[in-house]
Image (cartoon, rainbow, N blue to C red):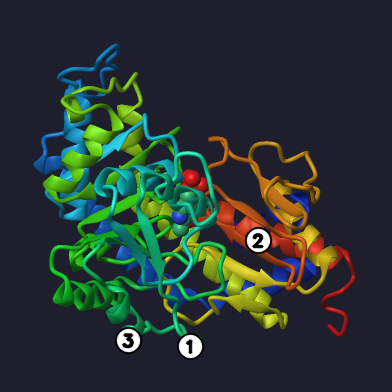
Amino acid sequence: MMENKDMLKDYYKQMGISEPVYEFCHRMEEGLKERFAKIDEVAECNQMKVLRAMRENRLSEACFAPTTGYGYNDIGRETLEKIYASVFHTEDALVRPQITCGTHALALALMSQLRPGDELLSPVGKPYDTLEEVIGIRPSNGSLAEYGISYRQVDLLPDGSFDWDGIEKALNEKTKMVTIQRSKGYATRPTLSVERIGELIGFIKERKPDVICMVDNCYGEFVELREPSDVGADLVVGSLIKNPGGGLAPIGGYLCGTKECIDRAAYRLTSPGLGKEVGATLGVTSAFTQGLFLAPTVVKGALKGAIFAAAIYEELGFRVVPDSKESRHDIIQAVEFHDPELMVAFCEGIQAAAPVDSFVRPEPWDMPGYDSQVIMAAGAFVSGSSIELSADGPMKEPYAVYFQGGLTWEHAKYGIMMSLQKIYETGKIFRNE
Ligand SMILES: *Cc1c(COP(=O)(O)O)cnc(C)c1O
Protein backbone atom coordinates (compact mmCIF):
# COMPACT_ATOMS: atom_id res chain seq x y z
CA MET A 1 0.00 0.00 0.00
CA MET A 2 1.13 3.51 -0.75
CA GLU A 3 1.99 5.74 2.21
CA ASN A 4 -0.10 8.91 2.56
CA LYS A 5 2.96 11.05 1.90
CA ASP A 6 3.76 9.29 -1.37
CA MET A 7 0.15 9.45 -2.40
CA LEU A 8 0.12 13.19 -1.75
CA LYS A 9 3.31 13.70 -3.69
CA ASP A 10 1.83 11.71 -6.52
CA TYR A 11 -1.29 13.87 -6.48
CA TYR A 12 0.76 17.03 -6.63
CA LYS A 13 2.72 15.59 -9.53
CA GLN A 14 -0.48 14.82 -11.40
CA MET A 15 -1.61 18.35 -10.59
CA GLY A 16 1.44 19.84 -12.29
CA ILE A 17 3.88 20.30 -9.40
CA SER A 18 7.41 19.19 -10.28
CA GLU A 19 9.71 17.37 -7.88
CA PRO A 20 12.06 20.30 -7.07
CA VAL A 21 9.12 22.60 -6.34
CA TYR A 22 7.41 19.98 -4.20
CA GLU A 23 10.56 19.25 -2.18
CA PHE A 24 11.35 22.92 -1.64
CA CYS A 25 7.81 23.73 -0.49
CA HIS A 26 7.71 20.70 1.74
CA ARG A 27 10.90 21.80 3.45
CA MET A 28 9.57 25.32 3.97
CA GLU A 29 6.34 24.01 5.45
CA GLU A 30 8.26 21.87 7.95
CA GLY A 31 9.83 25.04 9.30
CA LEU A 32 6.45 26.68 9.97
CA LYS A 33 4.92 24.16 12.37
CA GLU A 34 5.30 26.33 15.48
CA ARG A 35 3.97 29.40 13.77
CA PHE A 36 0.99 27.46 12.48
CA ALA A 37 0.25 26.10 15.96
CA LYS A 38 -0.14 29.67 17.25
CA ILE A 39 -2.53 30.48 14.42
CA ASP A 40 -4.55 27.38 15.31
CA GLU A 41 -4.87 28.69 18.87
CA VAL A 42 -6.20 32.06 17.77
CA ALA A 43 -8.70 30.35 15.47
CA GLU A 44 -9.86 28.11 18.28
CA CYS A 45 -10.54 31.10 20.55
CA ASN A 46 -12.33 32.95 17.79
CA GLN A 47 -14.40 29.87 16.95
CA MET A 48 -15.56 29.79 20.58
CA LYS A 49 -16.32 33.51 20.47
CA VAL A 50 -18.54 33.07 17.40
CA LEU A 51 -20.20 29.91 18.67
CA ARG A 52 -20.95 31.47 22.03
CA ALA A 53 -22.55 34.48 20.32
CA MET A 54 -24.80 32.14 18.32
CA ARG A 55 -25.86 30.18 21.39
CA GLU A 56 -26.42 33.23 23.58
CA ASN A 57 -28.57 34.89 20.96
CA ARG A 58 -30.58 31.70 20.46
CA LEU A 59 -29.94 31.26 16.76
CA SER A 60 -32.67 28.94 15.48
CA GLU A 61 -33.72 27.29 12.26
CA ALA A 62 -36.57 29.77 11.92
CA CYS A 63 -33.96 32.50 11.42
CA PHE A 64 -33.08 31.11 8.00
CA ALA A 65 -36.52 31.68 6.45
CA PRO A 66 -36.34 34.20 3.60
CA THR A 67 -38.28 37.45 3.89
CA THR A 68 -39.45 39.64 1.02
CA GLY A 69 -40.96 43.08 0.49
CA TYR A 70 -40.41 45.47 3.41
CA GLY A 71 -38.92 42.75 5.55
CA TYR A 72 -40.62 43.80 8.78
CA ASN A 73 -39.98 41.54 11.77
CA ASP A 74 -37.23 39.57 10.07
CA ILE A 75 -36.11 37.51 13.04
CA GLY A 76 -33.13 36.07 11.17
CA ARG A 77 -31.81 39.53 10.34
CA GLU A 78 -32.36 40.72 13.91
CA THR A 79 -30.67 37.66 15.39
CA LEU A 80 -27.70 37.88 13.04
CA GLU A 81 -27.21 41.53 13.96
CA LYS A 82 -27.29 40.62 17.64
CA ILE A 83 -24.71 37.90 16.96
CA TYR A 84 -22.40 40.35 15.22
CA ALA A 85 -22.80 42.79 18.12
CA SER A 86 -21.88 39.98 20.55
CA VAL A 87 -18.83 38.91 18.54
CA PHE A 88 -17.53 42.47 18.25
CA HIS A 89 -18.62 43.40 21.80
CA THR A 90 -20.63 46.39 20.62
CA GLU A 91 -24.07 47.69 21.53
CA ASP A 92 -25.51 47.12 18.09
CA ALA A 93 -24.79 46.08 14.51
CA LEU A 94 -26.04 46.53 10.97
CA VAL A 95 -25.40 43.49 8.74
CA ARG A 96 -27.18 43.69 5.42
CA PRO A 97 -27.21 42.39 1.86
CA GLN A 98 -28.29 45.93 0.86
CA ILE A 99 -24.76 47.05 1.72
CA THR A 100 -23.19 46.20 -1.61
CA CYS A 101 -19.46 46.08 -0.78
CA GLY A 102 -16.77 47.32 1.60
CA THR A 103 -16.59 50.77 0.06
CA HIS A 104 -20.34 51.13 0.42
CA ALA A 105 -20.19 50.08 4.09
CA LEU A 106 -17.45 52.64 4.75
CA ALA A 107 -19.25 55.38 2.80
CA LEU A 108 -22.39 54.61 4.78
CA ALA A 109 -20.47 54.85 8.04
CA LEU A 110 -18.98 58.22 7.11
CA MET A 111 -22.04 59.79 5.50
CA SER A 112 -24.34 58.77 8.32
CA GLN A 113 -22.28 60.31 11.11
CA LEU A 114 -20.97 63.48 9.48
CA ARG A 115 -22.96 66.69 8.93
CA PRO A 116 -22.17 69.85 6.93
CA GLY A 117 -19.42 71.82 8.65
CA ASP A 118 -17.89 68.73 10.30
CA GLU A 119 -14.38 67.55 9.66
CA LEU A 120 -13.06 64.02 9.14
CA LEU A 121 -9.50 63.16 10.18
CA SER A 122 -7.35 60.26 9.00
CA PRO A 123 -4.38 60.00 11.39
CA VAL A 124 -2.89 57.02 9.50
CA GLY A 125 -2.22 58.55 6.09
CA LYS A 126 -4.06 58.13 2.83
CA PRO A 127 -7.12 55.89 3.02
CA TYR A 128 -7.96 53.04 0.64
CA ASP A 129 -8.19 54.13 -3.01
CA THR A 130 -11.95 53.93 -3.36
CA LEU A 131 -12.46 56.15 -0.32
CA GLU A 132 -10.70 59.04 -2.03
CA GLU A 133 -13.84 59.65 -4.06
CA VAL A 134 -16.14 59.08 -1.09
CA ILE A 135 -14.31 61.74 0.90
CA GLY A 136 -13.70 63.99 -2.10
CA ILE A 137 -9.90 63.86 -2.04
CA ARG A 138 -10.49 63.18 -5.72
CA PRO A 139 -13.54 65.26 -6.73
CA SER A 140 -16.57 63.06 -7.22
CA ASN A 141 -20.32 63.20 -7.49
CA GLY A 142 -21.92 63.03 -4.05
CA SER A 143 -18.68 63.10 -2.07
CA LEU A 144 -18.47 64.31 1.52
CA ALA A 145 -16.73 67.42 0.20
CA GLU A 146 -19.83 68.30 -1.85
CA TYR A 147 -21.81 68.32 1.39
CA GLY A 148 -19.41 70.75 3.02
CA ILE A 149 -17.55 68.17 5.09
CA SER A 150 -13.84 68.85 5.24
CA TYR A 151 -11.01 66.34 5.49
CA ARG A 152 -7.64 66.40 7.12
CA GLN A 153 -4.90 63.79 6.99
CA VAL A 154 -1.83 63.15 9.10
CA ASP A 155 0.63 60.74 7.54
CA LEU A 156 2.50 58.08 9.44
CA LEU A 157 6.14 58.92 10.09
CA PRO A 158 8.70 57.31 7.77
CA ASP A 159 9.32 54.49 10.30
CA GLY A 160 5.61 53.68 10.36
CA SER A 161 4.91 55.21 13.78
CA PHE A 162 2.11 57.68 14.56
CA ASP A 163 2.84 61.39 14.23
CA TRP A 164 1.52 62.23 17.72
CA ASP A 165 2.32 65.96 17.42
CA GLY A 166 0.74 66.18 14.00
CA ILE A 167 -2.38 64.40 15.21
CA GLU A 168 -2.69 66.64 18.24
CA LYS A 169 -2.43 69.73 16.02
CA ALA A 170 -4.90 68.38 13.46
CA LEU A 171 -7.66 67.85 16.05
CA ASN A 172 -9.83 70.96 16.19
CA GLU A 173 -13.35 72.06 17.13
CA LYS A 174 -14.69 70.83 13.78
CA THR A 175 -13.24 67.31 14.06
CA LYS A 176 -16.28 65.06 14.38
CA MET A 177 -14.92 61.73 13.21
CA VAL A 178 -11.66 59.87 12.83
CA THR A 179 -11.12 57.11 10.26
CA ILE A 180 -8.47 54.48 10.94
CA GLN A 181 -7.61 51.85 8.36
CA ARG A 182 -6.35 48.65 9.99
CA SER A 183 -4.98 46.91 6.90
CA LYS A 184 -2.27 48.43 4.76
CA GLY A 185 -4.49 47.69 1.78
CA TYR A 186 -2.35 48.20 -1.30
CA ALA A 187 -0.03 50.74 0.30
CA THR A 188 3.42 50.07 1.68
CA ARG A 189 2.78 51.19 5.23
CA PRO A 190 2.58 48.56 7.97
CA THR A 191 -0.76 47.06 8.95
CA LEU A 192 -1.90 48.25 12.38
CA SER A 193 -2.28 45.80 15.23
CA VAL A 194 -5.38 46.06 17.38
CA GLU A 195 -3.11 47.14 20.21
CA ARG A 196 -1.72 50.09 18.22
CA ILE A 197 -5.23 51.06 17.13
CA GLY A 198 -6.16 51.13 20.83
CA GLU A 199 -3.25 53.44 21.65
CA LEU A 200 -4.24 55.77 18.84
CA ILE A 201 -7.90 55.90 19.87
CA GLY A 202 -6.89 56.46 23.52
CA PHE A 203 -4.69 59.38 22.53
CA ILE A 204 -7.44 60.99 20.44
CA LYS A 205 -10.22 60.48 22.98
CA GLU A 206 -8.08 61.94 25.74
CA ARG A 207 -7.95 65.15 23.74
CA LYS A 208 -11.43 65.05 22.26
CA PRO A 209 -13.69 62.55 24.03
CA ASP A 210 -16.74 63.13 21.80
CA VAL A 211 -15.01 62.35 18.49
CA ILE A 212 -16.36 59.24 16.71
CA CYS A 213 -13.56 56.75 16.01
CA MET A 214 -14.25 54.46 13.06
CA VAL A 215 -12.01 51.58 11.99
CA ASP A 216 -11.93 50.19 8.45
CA ASN A 217 -11.59 46.57 9.53
CA CYS A 218 -11.36 45.04 6.02
CA TYR A 219 -9.12 41.93 5.93
CA GLY A 220 -8.48 42.17 9.68
CA GLU A 221 -11.39 40.25 11.20
CA PHE A 222 -10.42 37.19 13.27
CA VAL A 223 -6.70 37.56 12.63
CA GLU A 224 -6.21 38.48 16.28
CA LEU A 225 -8.06 37.63 19.47
CA ARG A 226 -9.45 41.14 19.79
CA GLU A 227 -11.14 43.48 17.35
CA PRO A 228 -10.79 47.29 17.24
CA SER A 229 -14.15 47.59 19.03
CA ASP A 230 -12.46 45.95 22.05
CA VAL A 231 -10.03 48.87 22.29
CA GLY A 232 -12.34 51.86 22.02
CA ALA A 233 -13.54 52.09 18.41
CA ASP A 234 -17.08 53.47 18.18
CA LEU A 235 -17.63 51.86 14.79
CA VAL A 236 -15.95 48.94 12.99
CA VAL A 237 -16.77 48.38 9.36
CA GLY A 238 -16.07 45.68 6.79
CA SER A 239 -17.10 43.62 3.80
CA LEU A 240 -18.81 40.23 3.91
CA ILE A 241 -17.01 39.01 0.81
CA LYS A 242 -13.82 39.23 2.83
CA ASN A 243 -13.06 37.63 6.22
CA PRO A 244 -16.35 37.65 8.17
CA GLY A 245 -18.44 36.17 5.35
CA GLY A 246 -16.34 33.01 5.59
CA GLY A 247 -16.55 32.56 1.81
CA LEU A 248 -20.27 31.79 1.97
CA ALA A 249 -21.80 35.27 2.07
CA PRO A 250 -22.65 36.12 -1.56
CA ILE A 251 -22.79 39.90 -0.89
CA GLY A 252 -22.97 42.33 2.00
CA GLY A 253 -21.28 44.53 4.52
CA TYR A 254 -21.37 45.13 8.25
CA LEU A 255 -21.11 47.95 10.75
CA CYS A 256 -20.76 47.22 14.48
CA GLY A 257 -20.73 49.97 17.06
CA THR A 258 -22.50 52.08 19.62
CA LYS A 259 -26.28 52.21 19.48
CA GLU A 260 -26.17 55.89 18.46
CA CYS A 261 -23.77 55.26 15.58
CA ILE A 262 -25.69 52.24 14.32
CA ASP A 263 -29.01 54.08 14.52
CA ARG A 264 -27.63 56.91 12.42
CA ALA A 265 -26.22 54.43 9.91
CA ALA A 266 -29.52 52.55 9.69
CA TYR A 267 -31.50 55.77 9.09
CA ARG A 268 -29.06 56.62 6.33
CA LEU A 269 -29.07 53.13 4.74
CA THR A 270 -32.86 52.86 4.55
CA SER A 271 -34.63 56.09 5.44
CA PRO A 272 -35.15 58.50 8.32
CA GLY A 273 -38.00 57.05 10.34
CA LEU A 274 -37.51 53.49 9.07
CA GLY A 275 -33.96 52.64 10.13
CA LYS A 276 -33.31 49.00 10.99
CA GLU A 277 -36.97 47.98 10.80
CA VAL A 278 -36.96 47.35 7.04
CA GLY A 279 -34.71 45.43 4.67
CA ALA A 280 -35.81 42.02 3.42
CA THR A 281 -33.07 39.39 3.50
CA LEU A 282 -34.32 37.35 0.51
CA GLY A 283 -32.87 34.13 1.88
CA VAL A 284 -29.24 35.14 2.47
CA THR A 285 -29.35 34.91 6.26
CA SER A 286 -28.28 31.28 6.44
CA ALA A 287 -25.23 31.97 4.23
CA PHE A 288 -24.35 35.04 6.32
CA THR A 289 -24.66 33.09 9.55
CA GLN A 290 -22.92 29.93 8.40
CA GLY A 291 -20.20 32.06 6.81
CA LEU A 292 -19.59 33.84 10.10
CA PHE A 293 -19.48 30.45 11.82
CA LEU A 294 -16.75 29.30 9.41
CA ALA A 295 -14.88 32.62 9.30
CA PRO A 296 -12.33 31.94 12.07
CA THR A 297 -11.27 28.71 10.31
CA VAL A 298 -11.22 30.28 6.87
CA VAL A 299 -9.10 33.18 8.12
CA LYS A 300 -6.77 30.64 9.70
CA GLY A 301 -6.20 28.94 6.34
CA ALA A 302 -5.66 32.25 4.57
CA LEU A 303 -3.14 33.34 7.21
CA LYS A 304 -1.18 30.11 6.92
CA GLY A 305 -1.11 30.57 3.15
CA ALA A 306 0.21 34.12 3.51
CA ILE A 307 2.99 33.00 5.86
CA PHE A 308 3.83 29.98 3.68
CA ALA A 309 4.24 32.28 0.67
CA ALA A 310 6.27 34.78 2.67
CA ALA A 311 8.63 32.01 3.77
CA ILE A 312 9.03 30.61 0.25
CA TYR A 313 9.64 33.85 -1.57
CA GLU A 314 11.81 35.26 1.18
CA GLU A 315 13.99 32.15 1.00
CA LEU A 316 14.31 32.72 -2.75
CA GLY A 317 15.61 36.25 -2.13
CA PHE A 318 12.55 38.37 -2.90
CA ARG A 319 11.33 41.13 -0.59
CA VAL A 320 8.08 40.10 1.09
CA VAL A 321 5.79 42.37 3.13
CA PRO A 322 5.19 41.39 5.87
CA ASP A 323 8.22 39.13 6.22
CA SER A 324 7.91 35.50 7.24
CA LYS A 325 8.57 36.15 10.95
CA GLU A 326 6.51 39.29 11.65
CA SER A 327 3.26 39.13 13.58
CA ARG A 328 0.20 39.41 11.36
CA HIS A 329 -2.71 41.81 11.60
CA ASP A 330 -4.38 41.16 8.24
CA ILE A 331 -4.39 38.42 5.58
CA ILE A 332 -2.65 40.31 2.76
CA GLN A 333 0.80 39.26 1.53
CA ALA A 334 2.94 41.26 -0.86
CA VAL A 335 5.87 39.86 -2.86
CA GLU A 336 8.13 42.17 -4.85
CA PHE A 337 9.50 40.55 -8.00
CA HIS A 338 11.14 43.49 -9.81
CA ASP A 339 10.45 41.47 -12.95
CA PRO A 340 7.22 41.53 -14.99
CA GLU A 341 7.71 37.97 -16.24
CA LEU A 342 7.84 36.55 -12.72
CA MET A 343 4.88 38.62 -11.64
CA VAL A 344 2.77 37.28 -14.51
CA ALA A 345 3.97 33.73 -13.81
CA PHE A 346 2.95 34.05 -10.16
CA CYS A 347 -0.56 35.13 -11.15
CA GLU A 348 -0.82 32.35 -13.74
CA GLY A 349 -0.08 29.84 -11.01
CA ILE A 350 -2.73 31.22 -8.66
CA GLN A 351 -5.26 31.17 -11.50
CA ALA A 352 -4.35 27.64 -12.61
CA ALA A 353 -4.89 26.42 -9.04
CA ALA A 354 -8.39 27.90 -8.76
CA PRO A 355 -11.48 25.69 -8.48
CA VAL A 356 -13.32 28.02 -10.90
CA ASP A 357 -11.91 29.31 -14.21
CA SER A 358 -8.67 27.37 -13.76
CA PHE A 359 -8.33 27.16 -17.55
CA VAL A 360 -8.11 30.89 -18.21
CA ARG A 361 -4.81 32.76 -18.34
CA PRO A 362 -4.64 36.11 -16.60
CA GLU A 363 -3.15 38.92 -18.66
CA PRO A 364 -2.16 42.48 -17.78
CA TRP A 365 -4.84 44.97 -18.89
CA ASP A 366 -5.58 48.69 -18.77
CA MET A 367 -7.92 48.97 -15.83
CA PRO A 368 -9.77 52.30 -15.61
CA GLY A 369 -8.38 54.58 -12.94
CA TYR A 370 -4.86 53.11 -12.90
CA ASP A 371 -1.74 54.69 -14.37
CA SER A 372 -0.24 51.35 -15.40
CA GLN A 373 -1.54 47.97 -16.51
CA VAL A 374 -2.92 45.69 -13.82
CA ILE A 375 -2.88 41.90 -13.62
CA MET A 376 -5.40 39.92 -11.58
CA ALA A 377 -5.83 36.25 -10.80
CA ALA A 378 -9.07 35.02 -9.30
CA GLY A 379 -11.22 31.97 -9.76
CA ALA A 380 -13.89 32.42 -7.16
CA PHE A 381 -17.28 30.97 -6.30
CA VAL A 382 -18.40 34.46 -5.28
CA SER A 383 -17.45 37.01 -7.92
CA GLY A 384 -14.73 39.36 -6.72
CA SER A 385 -14.44 37.64 -3.36
CA SER A 386 -11.01 38.21 -1.91
CA ILE A 387 -11.33 35.79 0.99
CA GLU A 388 -10.98 33.24 -1.82
CA LEU A 389 -7.46 32.78 -3.16
CA SER A 390 -6.68 35.77 -5.35
CA ALA A 391 -3.76 37.91 -6.45
CA ASP A 392 -3.27 41.18 -8.24
CA GLY A 393 -0.89 44.05 -8.72
CA PRO A 394 0.09 46.96 -10.96
CA MET A 395 2.59 46.21 -13.75
CA LYS A 396 5.26 48.66 -12.65
CA GLU A 397 8.21 48.77 -10.26
CA PRO A 398 8.57 47.09 -7.88
CA TYR A 399 6.38 44.57 -9.76
CA ALA A 400 4.71 43.53 -6.52
CA VAL A 401 1.83 41.09 -6.31
CA TYR A 402 -0.60 41.36 -3.46
CA PHE A 403 -2.31 38.17 -2.70
CA GLN A 404 -4.76 37.00 -0.13
CA GLY A 405 -7.33 34.42 0.78
CA GLY A 406 -7.85 30.74 0.35
CA LEU A 407 -10.96 29.10 1.73
CA THR A 408 -8.86 26.24 3.06
CA TRP A 409 -5.20 26.01 3.97
CA GLU A 410 -4.86 23.07 1.59
CA HIS A 411 -6.03 25.14 -1.34
CA ALA A 412 -3.92 28.16 -0.40
CA LYS A 413 -0.91 25.84 -0.20
CA TYR A 414 -1.54 24.34 -3.61
CA GLY A 415 -2.07 27.79 -5.12
CA ILE A 416 1.26 28.99 -3.80
CA MET A 417 3.00 25.81 -4.95
CA MET A 418 1.49 26.36 -8.38
CA SER A 419 2.70 29.98 -8.41
CA LEU A 420 6.20 28.73 -7.66
CA GLN A 421 5.88 26.04 -10.33
CA LYS A 422 5.11 28.68 -12.98
CA ILE A 423 8.02 30.75 -11.79
CA TYR A 424 10.25 27.67 -11.87
CA GLU A 425 9.20 27.11 -15.48
CA THR A 426 10.63 30.52 -16.45
CA GLY A 427 14.06 29.06 -15.62
CA LYS A 428 14.91 32.01 -13.39
CA ILE A 429 15.05 30.24 -10.02
CA PHE A 430 16.77 27.15 -8.55
CA ARG A 431 19.56 27.48 -11.08
CA ASN A 432 22.29 26.41 -8.69
CA GLU A 433 20.47 23.52 -7.08
C1 LIG B 1 -11.30 45.87 0.23
C2 LIG B 1 -11.10 47.07 1.06
C3 LIG B 1 -11.98 48.16 0.99
C4 LIG B 1 -13.11 48.27 -0.01
O1 LIG B 1 -13.88 47.17 -0.13
P1 LIG B 1 -14.60 46.80 -1.52
O2 LIG B 1 -15.47 45.68 -1.12
O3 LIG B 1 -13.55 46.44 -2.50
O4 LIG B 1 -15.40 47.99 -1.93
C5 LIG B 1 -11.73 49.22 1.83
N1 LIG B 1 -10.69 49.23 2.67
C6 LIG B 1 -9.82 48.21 2.75
C7 LIG B 1 -8.67 48.27 3.70
C8 LIG B 1 -10.00 47.10 1.94
O5 LIG B 1 -9.13 46.09 2.01
Q: Is residue 420 above or below residue 168?
A: above
Q: Give how far across and how far down residue 193 sits, in percent.
A: 35, 73
- Residues at discs 2 and 1 in contact (Cβ within 8 Å): no
Q: Give how far across and how far down residue 362 sits, in percent.
A: 77, 47
Amino acid type for the residue under numbered disc 1 = Asp
Q: Is residue 142 above or below residue 7?
A: above
Counting every numbered tag in the picture gives 3
Q: Regarding mark 1 in the picture, which secondary structure is present there?
A: loop
Amino acid type for the residue under numbered disc 2 = Ile
Q: Which residue is mark 1?
A: 159
Amino acid type for the residue under numbered disc 3 = Asp
Q: Residue furthest top?
A: 69
- Residues at discs 3 and 2 in contact (Cβ within 8 Å): no
Give the residue at x 44% y 52%. Answer: 135
Q: Which residue is mark 2?
A: 416
Give the residue at x 44% y 64%. Answer: 183
Q: Separation of disc 1 and disc 3 at Cα?
A: 15 Å
Q: Nearer the viewer, residue 218 or 366?
A: 366
Q: Which mark is residue 308?
A: none
Q: Is residue 402 above or below residue 79?
A: below
Q: Give how far across and how far down residue 349 sits, in percent.
A: 74, 55
Query: Circle 1: is it few (<14), some (14-19), or many (20+) Cα within 10 Å?
Result: few
Q: Regarding mark 3 in the picture, which secondary structure is present there?
A: helix
- Asked whether, in this view, residue 382 is left or right of residue 253, the answer is right
State which quadrant residue 294 falls in: top left
Q: Does the image show residue 52?
A: no
User: First in sequence: mark 1 or mark 3?
Assistant: 1
Q: Which residue is mark 3?
A: 165
Q: Is residue 264 above or below residue 1?
A: above
